[in-house]
Image (cartoon, helix red, strand yellow):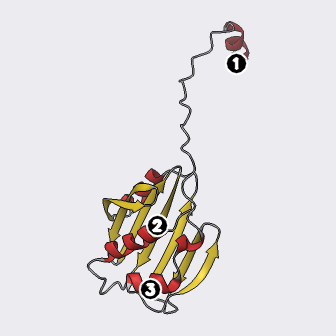
Amino acid sequence: MLAVLLAACTAPGDEPEQPAQETPQSAPPGLFFGECGGVSGDELMEVTGVRNVRLIERNSVGCRWEDPNFFGARASFSWYRGSPIGRERTLVEFAGRDVFEVTVEGASGQLTGFAGRGTGICEVSIESGADFFVWSVVFDQLNPPADMCERVQTLAEMTVSRAG
């Protein structure tokens, strides 16, 4: 009954103002990165130094390689279309990884992103238009290479240089 009385007391145009909502600016689609980021399993092992990984999953937006040994190395390429890279950065920071800026040179110019370094893991995320991709490699946890993020950044450079 009270709701009816309150509704009756409100004149048209007396509704509370709604805050203006910004229309998100949509960036153009990014480069086409191709299957598995344009990188083969042999190239992945050569660049990173991980051994014995086999392609176990491949779809239109990513690939995953794993060592059959449960504690072995793993790697993945994931392509996020129309998704903000900032959300990925927040997740990497929340996971407690050291995060730093990276730049990758490609045929269409420089692309920027970030790398996240943790114990035995490095992820490099690169933005292209409204899209971004992530290369993630889990190295030997007991003895990861000191230059592991440079190795993963090389994968990102290969992906950008082979993009269409």
- 44 vs 37: above or below: below
Please name whichever residue, 47 or 121, is drawn nearer the observer in this view of the structure. 47
**Dot 3 surroundings within 10 Å: few (below 14), some, or many (20 or more)?**
some
Residue at image mark 2: 161
Residue 72 in which image quadrant: bottom left
Locate the C terminus by quadrant: bottom right
Report, in whole angstroms, how far the alpha carbon at label 2 lies from the one at label 1. Answer: 64 Å
The disc, 2 or 1, on the residue closer to the chain's N-terminal end is 1
Residue at image mark 3: 45
Residue 49 in which image quadrant: bottom left
Residue at image mark 1: 3
Of labels 3 and 2, the one closer to you: 2
Residue 102 in which image quadrant: bottom left
Report, in whole angstroms, how far the alpha carbon at label 1 lies from the one at label 3. Answer: 68 Å
Report, in whole angstroms, how far the alpha carbon at label 3 lies from the one at label 2. Answer: 18 Å
Q: Secondary structure at mark 3?
A: helix
Locate the N terminus by quadrant: top right
Q: Residue furthest left?
A: 146
Of labels 2 and 1, the one closer to you: 2
Q: Position of residue 62 (x, y in %)?
A: 58, 70
Q: Position of residue 6 (x, y in %)?
A: 67, 13
The disc, 1 or 3, on the residue closer to the chain's N-terminal end is 1
**Dot 2 surroundings within 10 Å: few (below 14), some, or many (20 or more)?**
some
Q: Amino acid at mark 3?
A: Met
